[in-house]
Image: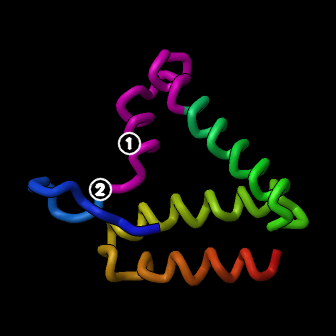
Amino acid sequence: MEIRRKRGDSTPGPQGCPFLMALAEFPDPAHRAAVTVKAWVRDRLGQLIADLASGGLATQPELLADQLSLIMEGTYASAQALSAAGPARLTRILAESLLDVN
């Protein structure tokens, strides 16, 4: 996963997970925006699981998808707190090692 900014964006560096930021704006779990974000994330995770299973990339696709989700969230948090040059720079290596094991 690469962490990039839009050209002309004056925001200094990564700002964290856009999904969690959206949920923070709508703390009521029943709010339409919160429900929509959660549904979108669940759909993407479901698609990842299906892709991993159908491609034969994982013996336990649900477990691998959860692990990759944790890596993604950790990368966003680490990049925001410690910069993309910090531990987040190891994201690809970590994800590839999980793919090799599964």
Dot 1 corresponds to which residue? Answer: 21
- Position of 51 with respect to 10 (left or right) is right
Q: Is residue 75 above or below residue 18?
A: below
Separation (CA) of disc 2 from disc 1:
9 Å
- Position of 74 with respect to 68 (left or right) is left
- Binning the other alpha carbons within 10 Å of mark 1 as few (below 14), some (14 to 19) or many (20 upward) gives few
Q: Nearer the viewer, residue 42 or 25?
A: 42
Q: How is the image coloured?
A: rainbow
Please name the predominant secondary structure of the magenta segment in the image. helix
Q: Is mark 2 on a helix, strand or loop?
A: loop
Give percent across and percent down for residue 92: 53, 77
- Position of 49 with respect to 88 (left or right) is right
Give percent across and percent down for residue 38: 57, 32
Dot 2 corresponds to which residue? Answer: 15
Mark 2 residue type: Gln
Displayed quadrant of residue 47: top right
**In which quadrant of the rendered image does the C terminus lie?**
bottom right
Residue at x 48%, y 22% (from the top left corner): 28
Residue 78 magenta-highlighted: no
Total residue callouts: 2
Q: Which of 10 and 87 is in front in this view?
A: 10
Q: Is residue 81 above or below residue 36?
A: below
Displayed quadrant of residue 87: bottom left
Displayed quadrant of residue 57: bottom right
What residue occupies the far front of the structure in this picture?
Answer: 55
Q: What stretch is highlighted in magenta?
A: 16-37
Residue at x 64%, y 79% (from the top left corner): 96
Q: Is mark 1 on a helix, strand or loop?
A: helix
